[in-house]
Amino acid sequence: MTDSANTPGFVQRPMPAPPDEASRSWHRLSARMIIVRPLHEIVGSFPFLALLLITDNAGLWRVLAVGYLTGLFLVRGVVHWWRTSYRIDAEQVEVRTGLFVRKHLAVRRDRIRTVAVTVKWGHRLFGLTRLDIGTGREDPVSLDGIPSDRAERLREDLLGPVADTPGSTETAAARGVGTTPAGPNNSQTLRTLQPTWLRYAPLTLSGLASGGAAVGIAFRALDTTDTNPTDIGVLHALGTWVQHSPPAVIAAAAFGCVLAVVVVLSLANYAVQFWNYRLWQAADGSLGVRRGLFTSRSLSISRERLRGVLRSEQLLLRAGGGSRLTAIVTGLGGQENSRSGLLLPPAPRTVANHTAAQCLGEPRSPVATVLTRHPTRAAWRRQSRAVGPMLLIAAALAGCAVWAGAGWPDWPWVAVLALTPGAPLLALDRYRYLGHALTAHYLVTRSGSLRRDTAALQRTGIIGWKLRCSLFQRLAGLSTLTATTAAGDGAYEVTDVGYTDAVALADSAVPDLLEPFLVAPTDPATETHLRNQDTPSSGSSKFSV
């Protein structure tokens, strides 16, 4: 694997100054974690514990089970504090943990890329903080139980100081980090949460998921307690009303109730996740993000680790003109990047574009660049991939119904056949927004329909290329070009682009990277091609750099 110091666009961070002698010794987490960790686990398991206690036929063993689990949580808290210690010196960060399986983790300080700060409600109550130290290649090293004032000093020692937003009067425990003096001259607030953004909360469908989970838990509780829903007064009255009401009225009332619940839960979920949201830029150019009500998350992103941005738009959110923005950061990957690297919650698309330009230091937002449309053959591929499987499923279900005779219901294949006309529209929407572009500093690619993602990846952050042609792509003369990077998801695709166009795009984006594999054309009228790779051979062909 290529060393990060030789990666294009990588800026070597100077070795931090050696800590004092006191920090060279091994330290324990705060003893307050003996209480905080069990509290978090008990609250997280509260629905299960409550079901054990409220069951009508619960015997003594259920009460003992609740007591046993509660005691187990307390013991885990004591063991975690007793068997966890850490040490930070001039060269590395070391953490020792475990009782039966002892682990000794060590991270070189020059490999540290992120230090994320997380403060749950129990941490805030006892003035503690959790630090997640990430290198981008392994799972983060966690220090769960650092006093808030010391946590901020450790973060500054590991990554360098980042000024806070000016004018903030919150306490360190409430904000999740220690206080750092800041003034108008050394930091700039880029974005804060606006009340008008709440209108995008119902378009994220988070309330629908929360409502479905709540209904499932409620029915599970009724089933566990052997409770008949008709014995509950409100539900009994509701059932009586349904029996004596017209179907149209019932449908309208059900739709109104579901819509109201989804809206309320979506607003609550939006407020919990993005309460006190703030995005700022420090004097050294690094970015800082803080958000969360019960669990406060804070992350600082230096310019040397920022490799681009990702603008995501779910179907309903896109229809409402909204989107969210996530940073593509070295050291954050996969779900961690989407959770901790969030730059902007669901907000107007114009705000997302402007925020992307501010964070990247560009006069115009790369994610708002006009993209190059892909060949029409890509549209036919999407149509065949959308309609073909639906027809095959409908035919298979219809065949099973005929084979089984009268005992097989007809509605499955009829339902699939009824959904088939919507497949071409979905395929057309996928092709309509498929495209790519190459700006002075970024490779921009966009794809998707139910969730449309537009990624702007820094060209100097691309460390490799992969050119893939499946059987059906070869028949259509198309290929998928994948740019690999050490940031974000690690790979960003330009899907269903012409084969020679893909090679030319890769060569233009990072010329020095692909040059050893290119040969000059023998005919000036022809385009640059790959040695012995002008046309893909049979089988699935891959080209890796």
Image (cartoon, rainbow, N blue to C red):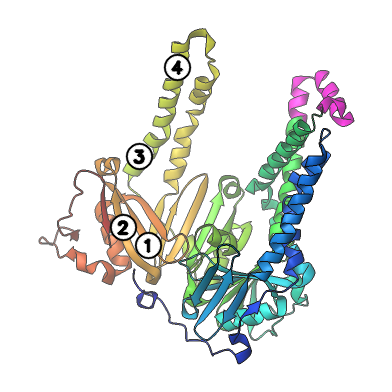
Q: Position of residue 34 (x, y in %)?
A: 74, 67
Q: Which amino acid is tagged 3?
A: Arg
Q: Do the residues labelled 3 and 4 touch (CB within 8 Å)?
A: no
Q: Can residue 160 be seen in this view?
A: no
Q: Are marks 1 and 4 in contact (CB under 8 Å)?
A: no
**Number of callouts:** 4
**Which mark lies nearer to you, 4 or 2?**
4
Magenta-highlighted residues:
228-253
**Mark 2 residue element:** strand
User: Residue 484, labelled with which disc?
Assistant: 1
Q: Position of residue 198 (x, y in %)?
A: 71, 55
**Mark 4 residue element:** helix
**Which mark lies nearer to you, 3 or 1?**
1
* Vertical arrangement, residue 371 with respect to residue 80, above or below: above
How crowded pointer 3 is (Cα within 10 Å; few <14, some 14-19, many 20+) is rated as: some
Give the residue at mark 3: 381
* Vertical arrangement, residue 234 with respect to residue 35, above or below: above
Give the residue at mark 4: 400
Give the residue at mark 2: 466
**Going from the N terminus, do you reach mark 3 or mark 4 first?**
3
- Spatial CA distance of label 4 from label 2 is 42 Å
Q: Are marks 1 and 2 in contact (CB under 8 Å)?
A: yes
Q: Please give the name of the residue rendered at 42% of the width and 67% of the height, measured from the top-left corner.
A: 486
Q: Which amino acid is tagged 2?
A: Lys
**Going from the N terminus, do you reach mark 3 or mark 2 first?**
3
